Image (spheres, rainbow, N blue to C red):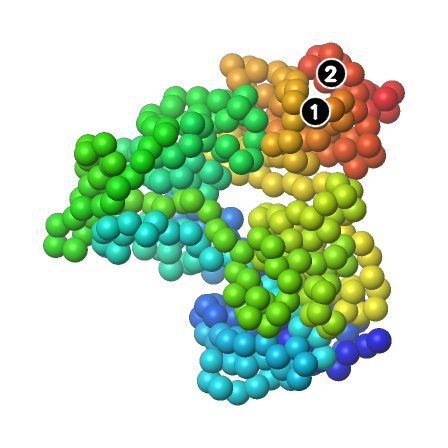
């Protein structure tokens, strides 16, 4: 059944793409796109890399040019917040007290950046990287010779550490776990990433316990640890990830569990309400479980699924996840779920300028992680992704042999 209006809450990449794809799929009704930030939808991956280093203008991150929304009859409301959803009345209440009716509602609320509730955490010079403003403020502090502490050894922390080092800063990564990238990739991959950072002069401290921050004249000057020691610093980056922004959904009675629960078509358990992007935990038929993905690919592809569902063209979304992380002149690309494994097969080597790790669990290929120049590892990661999509698990000895092209291995399996 065609709906007469769609309201999209959240004007990030997934929200913006949903609006555009609705028109692309032939939707003719009203579209309202609501964003809390003062900007039109933009991509976030460059914020910790090219934008932070000044290699890319912020304006180049926007999804579409200034005239796109008017030309496509999309009512873009920036600097506005949705404060409540009434599923029974099919309306959204905005921060000015007005109510906006909808035929279908898309929640693309993204994530809330995690901070550290510790003494001194409000001092100047302590940064997160989530918005254009965050990136600009951090960039101003990354001066050559500055002592920069990056808290968190995940993707965002390591990308920021690499950028800061390339800008001439003295960088230390502080990770509370026994290794970096603990939730994302196996130990072997994490070790290779740590080696690259170490070779570029970044110090990585593990099992760190932070007690708080001290400062002078309102600005951070040191990180204090629970053992009583301290580390002087000129700037701190908190890169410990995001939490899905489910507050609006939970208040409206929409089921959530580390994300807004949706089916393979992007629909929540409340009629007429959908969710997409970082905030959504979706049923994935390929894996037979619910998965929440924080990636550029998911924000884009899940938006297409939701747009098609609203237009009466449902198509199940069952991705083999793919993501990338640029660090120095190397790229880490993963596909599948490489953290789920009991066996890791290595192809190539770090010293040869590129290494690919295949992860296997119970005899099934579950993931791949390629680390090196993109020209070296991208093709193998793509072929491994195709293997997983087709349910193919080659002989591990063949996967480990770089003289055997992966495509030939896949065809023969």
| Residue 64 location (% of width, % of height) | 59, 64
**Residue corresponding to mark 2:** 396
User: Are the two marked residues, 2 and 1, in contact with CB atoms closer than 8 angstroms?
Assistant: yes
Point out residue 156 in the picture as x, y percentages from the top left corner: 46, 43
Residue 347 position in % (x across, y down): 64, 17
Residue at image point 71% right, 12% down = 401
Q: Is residue 52 above or below residue 167?
A: below
The tag earlier along the polypeptide, 2 or 1, is 1
Q: For numbered disc 2, what is the local secondary structure? A: helix
Q: Viewer-proximal residue, 401 or 95?
A: 95
Q: CA distance from mark 2 to mark 1?
A: 9 Å
For disc 1, the marked residue is 360
Q: Quadrant of the C terminus?
A: top right
State the residue lying farthest toward the right: 412
Label 1 secondary element: strand
Regarding residue 64, the answer to whether it shows in the image is no
Q: Residue at x 59, y 21 (%)?
A: 355
Which of discs 2 and 1 lies nearer the camera? The answer is 1
């Amino acid at each position: 059944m065609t709906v007469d209006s769609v309201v999209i809450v959240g004007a990030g990449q997934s929200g913006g793409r949903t609006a555009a794809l609705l028109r692309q799929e032939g939707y003719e009704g009203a579209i309202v796109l609501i964003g809390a930030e003062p900007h039109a939808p933009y991509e976030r991956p460059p914020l910790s890399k090219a934008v932070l280093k000044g290699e890319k203008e912020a304006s180049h991150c926007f999804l579409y040019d200034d005239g796109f929304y008017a030309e496509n009859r999309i009512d873009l409301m920036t600097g506005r917040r949705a404060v409540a959803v009434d599923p029974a009345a099919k309306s959204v209440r905005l921060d000015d007290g007005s109510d906006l009716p909808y035929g279908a509602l898309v929640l693309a609320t993204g994530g809330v950046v995690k901070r550290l509730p510790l003494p001194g955490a409000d001092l100047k010079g302590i940064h997160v990287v989530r918005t254009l403003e965050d990136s600009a403020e951090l960039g101003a502090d990354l001066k050559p010779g500055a002592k920069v502490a990056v808290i968190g050894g995940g993707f965002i922390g390591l990308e920021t550490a690499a950028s800061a080092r390339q800008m001439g800063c003295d960088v230390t990564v502080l990770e509370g776990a026994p290794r970096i990238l603990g939730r994302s990739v196996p130990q072997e991959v994490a070790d290779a990433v740590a080696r690259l950072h170490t070779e570029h002069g970044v110090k990585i401290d593990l099992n760190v316990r932070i007690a708080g921050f001290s400062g002078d004249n309102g600005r951070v000057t040191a990180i204090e640890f629970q053992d009583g020691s301290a580390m002087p610093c000129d700037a701190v980056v908190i890169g410990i990830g995001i939490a899905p922004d489910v507050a609006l959904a939970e208040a409206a009675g929409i089921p959530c569990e580390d994300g807004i629960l949706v089916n393979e078509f992007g629909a929540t358990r409340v009629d007429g309400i959908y969710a997409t992007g970082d905030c959504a935990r979706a049923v994935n038929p390929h894996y037979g479980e619910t998965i929440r993905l924080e990636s550029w690919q998911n924000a884009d592809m899940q938006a297409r699924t939701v747009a098609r569902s609203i237009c009466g063209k449902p198509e199940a979304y069952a991705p083999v996840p793919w993501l990338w992380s640029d660090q120095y002149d190397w790229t880490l690309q993963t596909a599948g779920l490489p953290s789920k494994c009991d066996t890791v097969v290595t192809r190539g080597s770090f010293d040869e300028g590129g290494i690919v790790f295949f992860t296997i669990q119970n005899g099934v290929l579950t993931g791949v992680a390629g680390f090196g120049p993109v020209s070296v590892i991208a093709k193998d990661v793509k072929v491994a992704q195709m293997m997983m999509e087709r349910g193919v698990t080659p002989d591990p000895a063949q996967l480990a042999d770089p003289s055997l092209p992966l495509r030939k291995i896949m065809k023969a399996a």
